[in-house]
Image (cartoon, rainbow, N blue to C red):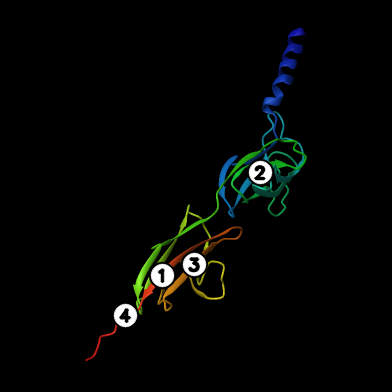
Amino acid sequence: MVRNVLLLLLLLVSLPAFAGGIVVTPNTVSVRVGEQITLHAEDAPGGLSSGFPYDVTFTSDDPSIAEISGYASGKGYGQPYPYPNNGTVYVTGVAPGVAHVVTRGGYYGQLATITVAGDIGVTITPVGMTVRNGDIVTLVAFVNGGYANVTLEWFLGRTGDTSHLINVGPLLRFQPSAAKTYVWVRASNARAATTAEVEIDVLQRSRAVRH
């Protein structure tokens, strides 16, 4: 009898180690500012049972770093309700730093760690040039860091002047006319944008002197 009681006590003590609960996978991810990814949430197996009904809403413990939304709901382990997007966790990078996926109320603690990398970077090659009047200039914009879904827009003028859009895409070929011409490019996605500017000096061609 005493032995059975001891065994029962040991079993009860060990149950938390096998207890189920909400899990998010992967639980460690990196995103960039403006990038959105999705994670998966579900009820984990609960050892000796199939778990209990669950209904949680996901959020961020630091929305200034990462915006997080989504929900998971079901009868128990392996029994999610057939709702649209049930178990999908949406993560969007807002600013460089570290945030965590948590549930409203914080019952399950930190379910995933989100590391947000810095802003979009863009450079123009060449960074500056001197050409002769009538020459065709070729400029290339490079987005730093491997960002996806970035739009590149070229404008004639100083940075911020969007009145003269001259091309869209990484490559720009055009013929500058003013003695000092400025061109700038804007790299942007759904949540972030950055710019780079280049100065082009245009030399007038000398005319032959007739006698």
Q: Residues within 10 Å of mark 4 (few under 14, many from 20)?
A: few
The kind of residue tagged 4 is Arg
Residue 201 lies, with reference to residue 146, above or below; the image says below
Q: Secondary structure at mark 4?
A: loop
Residue 133 pos. (x, y %): 36, 78
**Residue on which disc 1 sits:** 200
Kind of residue at disc 3: Trp
The residue singled out by tag 4 in the image is: 205
> Cα distance, mark 3 to mark 1?
11 Å
Bin the neighbour count of mark 2 within 10 Å (Cα to Cα): few under 14, some 14-19, many 20 and up. Answer: many
Q: Is residue 146 above or below residue 73?
A: below
Q: Residue at x 59, y 55 (%)?
A: 34
Residue 184 numbered mark, or none = 3
Under mark 2, the amino acid is: Ala
Location of mark 2 (residue) = 41
136 vs 12, left or right, is left
Residue furthest to the bottom in view is 211
Q: Amino acid at mark 1?
A: Ile
In the rendered image, residue 183, in percent from the top left (x then y), is placed at 47, 69
